[in-house]
């Protein structure tokens, strides 16, 4: 299945039903008065978050969605039926934006959350509404108003606590395989990861977090080189970034690779580059044991790195557990300081996990 994380669709709410002009005509009641009913309201269009979806691929080909029109009013004061609402299931983490005005309509972060994106038309009024002591036979009614029509950009931003950054083949996919049950593709050539992967990391009873692995970045990604920066949006919700570096790369110096990634990150988003970021120096097992400490110290010194630093070997699991426990402690402290409305981004237990079908350890 192709991973689709951004689509543009057109939604149109239903038109309201017209009001009716009618008069009561029965035997022995020749002048029964007005009895035209109102029309029905048009149906609205809603987005609904579904934990069983993880891409927007359902909207890749069908791009137009319309709710039902309301029925017109009828005689005998019968009101027209309301048009049925139209519900569009989308993955949790979907952001809806109006293409024309660039207005942020809403953000779906919980399973079952509903967001109205197009308002149905209002019903027309029948002639019964206009009767009065001076107007006993009104012949006026009103038409139903048209439903709202919008071009929407639906953008999926996965919900994860931790995001992985790094060059291709830095070991991000190997790391997520080591700490969770997720099984992204791993190979000895660049860009084996073509779309984001999520994994649930269990640290203890009722303690877990979600980690997101995105395709590797290269120099010039902001201008479209490699896979570009289109997947960086999936890191926008994360509370922590792990910058994974290949210490034993034969082609890239670890210090240069870190600087290149930071430069591309800054071009994409000043907010993202300022987010908490830890340096994870990977593949230490490929260096002689007596050279590992010196290699880590050199990288830290040349980068003048001020944040936390961890040296690991993802493929063998060396020093991975201390990193996982440190991440859990950081996220728990962060959750305690979050405002109540922000807590959905960092689920507190397995029942609140935001993306369906994720692998579990």
Image (cartoon, grey):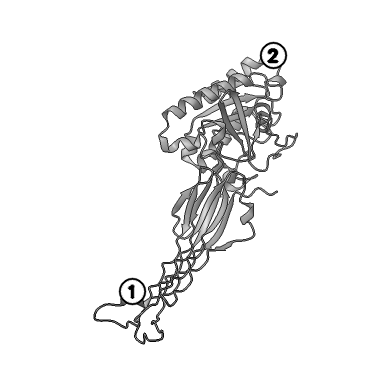
Q: Is residue 283 above or below residue 129?
A: above
Among the 4 quarters of the image, the one containing residue 249: top right
Q: Is residue 61 at least partly visible in the picture?
A: yes
Residue 24, numbered label: none
- Pick the quarter of the image with the C terminus: top right
Q: Is residue 83 above or below residue 272?
A: below
> Which residue is identified by label 2?
289
Question: How dense is the environment of label 2, judged by Cα within 10 Å: few (below 14), some, or many (20 and up)?
Answer: few
Q: Residue at x 50, y 65 (%)?
A: 83
Q: Residue at x 24, y 81 (%)?
A: 134
Q: Earlier in the sequence, mark 2 or mark 1?
A: 1
Question: How dense is the environment of label 1, judged by Cα within 10 Å: few (below 14), some, or many (20 and up)?
Answer: some
Disc 2 and disc 1: Cα gap in Å? 88 Å
Q: Nearer the viewer, mark 2 or mark 1?
A: 1
User: Which residue reaches farthest right?
Assistant: 188
Q: Position of residue 158 (x, y in %)?
A: 57, 41
User: Which residue reaches farthest top?
Assistant: 290
Q: Is residue 34 above or below residue 53?
A: below
Q: Position of residue 216 (x, y in %)?
A: 64, 38
Q: Residue at x 52, y 34 (%)?
A: 347
Q: Nearer the viewer, residue 50 or 7?
A: 50
Among the 4 quarters of the image, the one containing residue 281: top right
Q: Position of residue 145 (x, y in %)?
A: 42, 70
Label 2: which secondary element: helix
Q: Nearer the viewer, residue 8 or 227?
A: 8
Q: Position of residue 19 (x, y in %)?
A: 41, 75
Q: Nearer the viewer, residue 112 or 332?
A: 112
Label 1: which secondary element: helix
Among the 4 quarters of the image, the one containing residue 140: bottom left
Residue 129, numbered label: 1
Labelled pair 2, 1 in contact (Cβ < 8 Å): no
């Amino acid at each position: 299945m192709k991973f689709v994380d951004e689509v543009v669709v057109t939604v149109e709410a239903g038109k309201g039903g017209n009001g009716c002009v009618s008069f009561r005509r029965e035997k022995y009641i020749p002048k029964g008065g007005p009895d035209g009913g109102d029309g029905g309201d048009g149906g609205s269009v809603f987005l609904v978050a579904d934990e069983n979806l993880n891409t927007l691929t359902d909207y890749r080909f069908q791009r137009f969605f319309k709710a039902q029109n309301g029925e017109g009013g009828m005689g005998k004061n019968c009101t027209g039926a309301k048009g049925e609402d139209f519900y569009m299931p989308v993955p949790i983490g979907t952001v809806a934006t109006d293409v024309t005005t660039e207005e942020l309509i809403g953000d779906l972060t919980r399973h079952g959350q509903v967001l109205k994106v197009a308002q149905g038309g209002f019903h027309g009024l029948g002639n019964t509404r206009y009767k009065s002591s001076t107007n006993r036979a009104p012949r006026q009614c009103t038409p139903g108003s048209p439903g709202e029509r919008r071009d929407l950009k639906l953008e999926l931003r996965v919900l994860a606590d931790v995001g992985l950054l790094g060059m291709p083949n830095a070991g991000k996919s190997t790391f997520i395989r080591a700490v969770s049950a997720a099984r992204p593709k791993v190979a000895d050539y660049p860009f084996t990861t073509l779309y984001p992967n999520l994994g649930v990391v269990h640290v203890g009873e009722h303690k877990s977090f979600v980690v997101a692995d995105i395709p590797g970045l290269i120099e010039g990604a902001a201008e479209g080189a490699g896979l570009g920066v289109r997947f960086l949006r999936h890191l926008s919700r994360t509370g922590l970034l792990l910058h994974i570096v290949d210490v034993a790369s034969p082609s890239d110096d670890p210090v240069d690779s870190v600087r290149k990634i930071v430069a591309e990150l800054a071009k994409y988003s000043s907010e993202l580059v300022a987010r908490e970021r830890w340096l994870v120096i990977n593949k230490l097992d490929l260096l002689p044991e007596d050279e590992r400490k010196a290699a880590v110290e050199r990288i830290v010194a040349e980068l003048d790195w001020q944040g936390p630093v961890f040296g690991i070997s993802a493929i063998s699991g060396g020093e991975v557990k201390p990193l996982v426990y440190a991440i859990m402690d950081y996220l728990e402290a962060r959750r305690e300081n979050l405002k109540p409305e922000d807590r959905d981004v960092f689920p507190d237990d397995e029942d609140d996990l935001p993306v369906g079908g994720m692998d579990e350890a």
